[in-house]
Image (tube, rainbow, N blue to C red):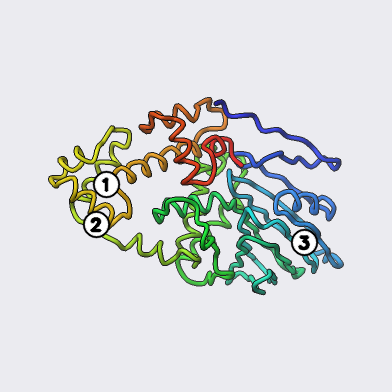
Amino acid sequence: MNRPTRARRSDASGSVLTEAAPRTSAVRRARDREEMQRLLSTVLGTRSLRLGPVDRRRPARLRVATLPHVVAAQVQFGADGEAVQDGIDDCYLVHLPVTGTLVIRTRDAEVRATPEWVGVVSPPGGAHVAWQRDTVATVLRIDRAAVEAELVDLTGLAGPPADPALAFQSTMDATGEPARSWRATALFIAENLGTPGSLLDHPLLAAHVERLLLRGLLVCHPHTYSGRLASSAAAIPPRHVREAVLRIQQRPSHPFTVATLARSVGVSARALQDGFRQHLGMSPMQYLRTIRLRGVREELLGLDPEDSTTVAEVATRWGFTHLGRFAQYYRARYGEPPSRTLRGP
């Protein structure tokens, strides 16, 4: 399957919009209220934008840059106002003020986001965000399925979390580590995405930059699965399990069986099965499949937009011989077909 070319169009104002988020960064700008409303509606789901008198010392500006599953909007309204955001069902919104204060109201909470406190809106629902005229902020719109996929890989969940859903604490104290570092990294990425010639503008780095943002958020900000994430990181399996894991990671496409793995680490097949289930929560063959699926996803996300590599080629390279079954496993684990990962949202 060849990667399709992204369709592009222009609206009446000449502002370039995209039919779907590109796999590498593209910068869009708006410099007046009407154009800002149109662009914010497209990229952040902002239904309405009400602004007071403009402070001419702070002209309105909006810059939007994208990664495969993240939109970064740098916003300065130069006026007091309120943005109403709808359809927060398929994404998380992270508000990172650089100056000033945002008051974020959802159905569950009212929080204040400042340079010291990050505001996070989790699905489902909507949000009313009140802006002060001196506020300059970056807002990240992060695809829900992409965050859930990273959580699956970090914790060993069998598939996207459903009960409970993945929900973040509504505020994050960014004065201490590691939240301070994550906030600084997010702002740096938003500022440099799409800058011609910058390191972040290289298409082969897009997936790695995005993963840093998503995994960093999961690690540093409390959420409904933080306890499981911490326990996954703390567990230390016995020697024979660690050695078997290492062999799988070094040769994921090799046709391992439980018996050959057990012999290679000097234990019985039963002991290896028991060790994997006790310490990793899955059988050796399930772990092998997990590593293969993770490798396929990383490769699909990292492919150059002009690359003609197909899903089938990548899956075969990682040891999958039954492509229909592979597609079922992939969708069950990551909540989307591999073809969507290849094309982007």
Q: Quadrant of residue 230?
A: bottom left
Cβ atoms under marks 2 and 1 closer than 8 Å: yes
Give the foreground label among 3 and 1: 1
Percent across and percent down for residue 291 are 36, 43
Cα separation, mark 3 vs mark 2, equals 53 Å
Q: Residue at x 54, y 43 (%)?
A: 336
Closer to the chain start, of discs 3 and 1, is: 3
Element carrying mark 1: helix
Which residue carries the number 1 mark? 245
Mark 2 surroundings: few (<14), some (14-19) or many (≥20) residues within 10 A: some
Percent across and percent down for residue 129 are 72, 67
Percent across and percent down for residue 96 are 62, 63
Which residue carries the number 2 mark? 237
Which residue carries the number 3 mark? 77
Q: Is residue 198 placed above or below 102 in the rendered structure?
A: above
Closer to the chain start, of discs 3 and 2, is: 3
On residue 46, the disc is: none
Cα separation, mark 2 vs mark 1, equals 10 Å
Q: Is residue 145 placed above or below 2 in the rendered structure?
A: below
Q: Amino acid at mark 3?
A: Phe
Cα separation, mark 3 vs mark 1, equals 52 Å
Cβ atoms under marks 3 and 1 closer than 8 Å: no
For the residue pair 63 and 252, the one nearer the viewer reads as 252
Element carrying mark 3: loop
Split into 4 quadrants, where in the image is the N terminus?
top right
Split into 4 quadrants, where in the image is the C terminus?
top right
Closer to the chain start, of discs 2 and 1, is: 2
Q: Quadrant of residue 117?
A: bottom right
Cβ atoms under marks 3 and 2 closer than 8 Å: no
Mark 3 surroundings: few (<14), some (14-19) or many (≥20) residues within 10 A: many
Query: In the current view of this chain or complex, which residue is farthest to the left?
Result: 266
Q: Amino acid at mark 1?
A: Val
